[in-house]
Amino acid sequence: MADQRIHIVDRVTTKAGRGRAFVDAYLADYVPQAVRIGMTLDRVLVSPPVWLEDDANTVTAIWTVSGHEQWWQTAISRRFDAGFVDFWHRVEPMVAQRSRSMEAAAESVEDMCRV
């Protein structure tokens, strides 16, 4: 059976000069909540790899969960947990744009279609 990990990719474009503050808040506030509900943080990437004062940084956080069941459990938990909603409200002044995608290894997709 192929790897059943699903990657949850959060991509946030910060407002100018707010990259470092956003990453600090994400690591301190969002990460512990996400770990508590079963998500595993793979890495947090910053682009460009320098804190910009007069321009935006793009922050990409890559998480993993073990297959469909855990993905659904974490998705439902995030939607109905006030802590996640509060976090995004608190950091809203730092964020220009954000998106989330769900991804899996290409060789895993066929098996994942058999739910």
Image (cartoon, rainbow, N blue to C red):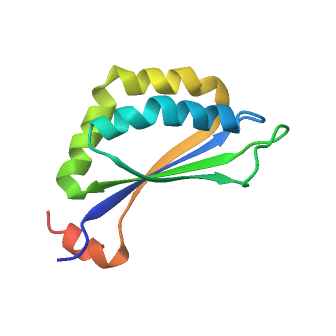
Quadrant of the snapshot with the C terminus = bottom left
x 66%, y 29%: residue: 94
Instruction: Give the image location of residue 27, x and y in percent.
Output: 51, 36
Q: Nearer the viewer, residue 39 or 15?
A: 39
Quadrant of the snapshot with the N terminus = bottom left
x 56%, y 30%: residue: 25
Instruction: Find the residue positioned furthest to the right.
Output: 54
x 29%, y 26%: residue: 80
Instruction: Give the image location of residue 106, x and y in percent.
Output: 36, 76
Instruction: Find the residue positioned furthest to the left.
Output: 115
Instruction: Give the image location of residue 64, x and y in percent.
Output: 35, 55
Instruction: Give the image location of residue 79, x and y in percent.
Output: 32, 31
Left or right of residue 115: residue 65:
right
Q: Quadrant of residue 4?
A: bottom left
Left or right of residue 36: residue 14:
right
Q: Quadrant of residue 109?
A: bottom left
Q: Quadrant of residue 16?
A: top right
Above or below — where is 110 with respect to 37? below
Left or right of residue 102: residue 4:
left
Left or right of residue 57: residue 30:
left
Q: Nearer the viewer, residue 32 or 9?
A: 32
Q: How many labels were placed on the picture?
A: 0
x 77%, y 34%: residue: 17
